[in-house]
Image: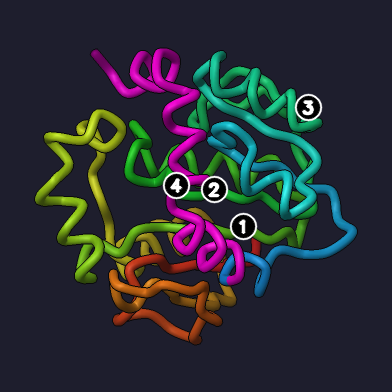
Amino acid sequence: MDSIQVYNQKSDEYDRWFDEHPVFFESELKALKKVVPLNKFGVEIGIGTGRFAEKLAVDRGLDPSESMANIAESRGIKTLIGKAEEMPFNENSFDYAVMITVDCFLENIPKAFQEVKRILKPGGVFIIGMINKNSVLGQTYQKRKHSNPFYRHATFHSPEELTVILEDAGFKSFEYWQTLITASETTPKEPERGYGKGGFVVLKAVSG
């Protein structure tokens, strides 16, 4: 069973995870809010059930899973079915694009990032929320992924790896924030600049 089938069949279980792990969700949300533009027209690629998009006031969504997209729609976000490598959007459509824990599932990262650049307006912002494979949290996910239906097909990356691909796609002016520095946090924490300690990293890049 590939990852799209898993998410189609287990979309409700996936959505409940955020209710069961509020510290993770709120900490990641705080980091994303550091860089997501206000009052701009944006899209979340791999929107899932729309948990983040709803809180970040993202206007549009895209997801390959129809079941996940339906839940995002129920949260008031117009969502299309499709993949990051070939998006059903016109050129220069958005002020910003968000991709949260999606890089690890992409079939072709360079092509996906080139597509993001295509749909962004000149000077548009691309925001990636990612699990840093070199962090304690990333290593834990890696060890346990074969027993986790959602991450069984995941390939985790480092911020350095994604930065190189972003540069090749024509992005610049990079900014990094990190959170989930320890796995035992019991309350949401304010994010710190940079990367290297946090399990969840937010990477901001500007379309050149």
- Disc assigned to residue 82: none
Where residue 166 appears, as percent x and y from the top left, is: 46, 59
* The N terminus: image quadrant: top left
Amino acid residing under circle 2 = Met
- Disc assigned to residue 78: 3
Which residue carries the number 1 mark? 126
In the displayed structure, 188 sits above or below 84; it is below
The disc, 4 or 3, on the residue closer to the chain's N-terminal end is 4
Element under label 3?
Answer: strand
Q: Nearer the viewer, mark 1 or mark 3?
A: 3
Q: Which residues are magenta?
A: 1-30
- Disc assigned to residue 99: 2
Quadrant of res 179: bottom left
Which residue carries the number 4 mark? 20
Where residue 176 appears, as percent x and y from the top left, is: 49, 77
Q: Quick check: marks 1 and 2 in contact, CB under 8 Å? A: yes
